[in-house]
Image (spheres, rainbow, N blue to C red):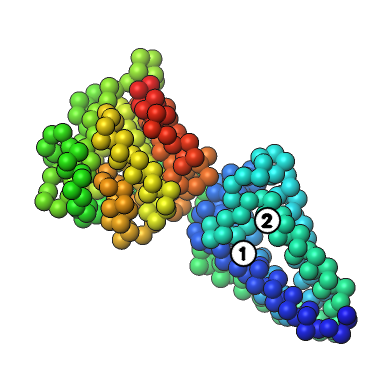
Amino acid sequence: MRNNQGLIWVFRFVVAILFIFSAYSKLIPIEAFEKQLVDQGITNWCFAPILARCIISFEFFLGIAFLQNHYFKKFILPATALMLAAFCIHLTYQIITQGNTGNCGCMGQLIPMTPLQALIKNGITLGILAYIFFNYKNTKEHKHRYPLFILFACFAIIFWKYRPECGCDAGVTTSSAPQTIIVEPLIKIDTVAKTSSSPATKAEPVKGADTKQKPIATKTSVTEPLKTQPVEEVAPGLPKTTSIFAPYKNFSTGITTNLDAGKNIVCLFNVDCDHCMNTCKELVEIHKSNKLPPVYILFWGDESQKDAFFKFAGGSFPYAFVDAGKFFRLLDKAPSPPRVVVLNEGNIVGDFTSDTFKKQALLDAVNK
C-alpha cells in the first residue's frame, strides 16, 4: 500500500477541503463563532474575538498546507491530528456536561451539527490521518519557508479582513452608543390597520417611567406598525434598573423611546431566520387578541429583507438594525436568534428563545 500514492492524494484532498470549509463556515458570521466560544465556557468576551480568529486561521493553514509536501509528515500531519484530538476531547466533555444538544459550531452556522455528529466526523478523519501517516512515501523536501509563508499569510489575511474588536467593554453589560439605522416607511400590510383599535398618533419621546402613553408610529398611507397599549408601569417593590437594551432608543418611523421605562417587549431577530419569522408571526397573532406592552425589534442582517420578513409575519413593529458584533452579545444565553425579552423598569421578567417561546408564557411574564 506504500506505493498507492493516488489514494493517499485523494485522502489528502478530502482532509484539506474539510479543514478549509470548516474554517470558512466559521466566518459566516464570525460573531456567531465568538459567541459559541463564550457560551461553551472556553473563553470570555475579552479574548473571544482573538481566539476565534486564531482557530480559523490555523484551520485554513492546515487545510492549505495539507496539499504540499514540506514538513508534511514531520509537522503538518501531527498538528492536524492534535487539533482534531483536542476537538474530540472538548466535544466529549460537552456531551457529558451538557448533553448531545445544540450546534457544536464545527461547521459554523452553515451546517449545524450536534456534538456527537461532530465527534463521529472527527473520529473518521483521524482514521484517515492514520492511514496517510503509515502509507505516505516520505520525501526529502523540508524547506520551512513554504509552510511558514502559508501560516503567516492565513493569519494576516484573516486578522486584516476580519479585524477583531475588543470585547472587554462590549459584552452584555455594554453601555456604548447603539448603532441603529432609521429607515424609510415599512411595507403596507392591510392586516395591520385592521388590528388597530384606534387611529395612530404622532410619535413622541418617552420622558420616563411615568409616561402614560407609549410612542407609536406616525400614520401614513404606506404603512402602520402594529400598535400596542401601555401596560401598568412597575410592580410594587420592583427596583428600576438599567438593562443591556438601554442604549437602543431610536427606532423606525422616527420613534424614540426608553426601553427601561415601564413595560416593553424587545425582540432580537435575524432578518432571514425562519425561526425569527415564525416567532414574529406568533407575536402578531398574540397582539391581535391580547393586551401587550409596546414591542420593539432589534434586527441583524440585510436591511433589504425586512419587507419580506414583515410580510410573512403579517404585521410589523418598530425596529432598528444593529451590527453583528453587538447583536450576538445581546443574545446573552440564547444560543441563537430569536430572543424575546419582557422588560419591566429595565428588569428582565421574561426571556424566551425559539424553543421556550409560548403564548401563555409570554402573557404570564407581561402580567407579572
* Cα separation between marks 2 and 1: 11 Å
Q: Residue at x 74, y 47 (%)?
A: 92
Q: Write the residue at 38% across / 15% down.
A: 237
- Inspect the image, locate mark 2, and give the three-letter code of the amino acid beneath it: Ala
Front label number (2 vs 1)? 2
Where does the image place residue 75, in percent across and percent down from the top left? 80, 70
Q: Amino acid at mark 1?
A: Ser
Q: Is residue 317 among what the camera can see?
A: yes
- Residue 232, image quadrant: top left
- Number of other residues with Cα within 10 Å of mark 1, as a class: few under 14, some 14 to 19, many 20 or more: many
Q: Please tell me the numbered disc located at residue 118.
A: 2
Would residue 38 be found to the left or right of residue 271 on screen? right
Is residue 69 in sight in this rendering?
A: no
Give percent across and percent down for residue 246. Answer: 36, 37
Question: Which quarter of the figure has residue 227?
Answer: top left
Q: Is residue 113 left or right of residue 344?
A: right
Labels in figure, total:
2
The residue positioned 11% from the left and 37% from the top of the image is: 199
- What element does badge 1 sit on? helix
Label 2 sits on a secondary structure element that is helix
Which residue matches tag 1? 22
The tag earlier along the polypeptide, 2 or 1, is: 1
Residue at the location (67% across, 75% down)? 64
Q: Residues within 10 Å of mark 2 (few under 14, many from 20)?
A: many
Q: Position of residue 294 (x, y in %)?
A: 27, 34
Q: Is residue 129 above or below residue 341?
A: below
Q: Position of residue 190 (x, y in %)?
A: 18, 48
Q: Is residue 149 above or below residue 350?
A: below
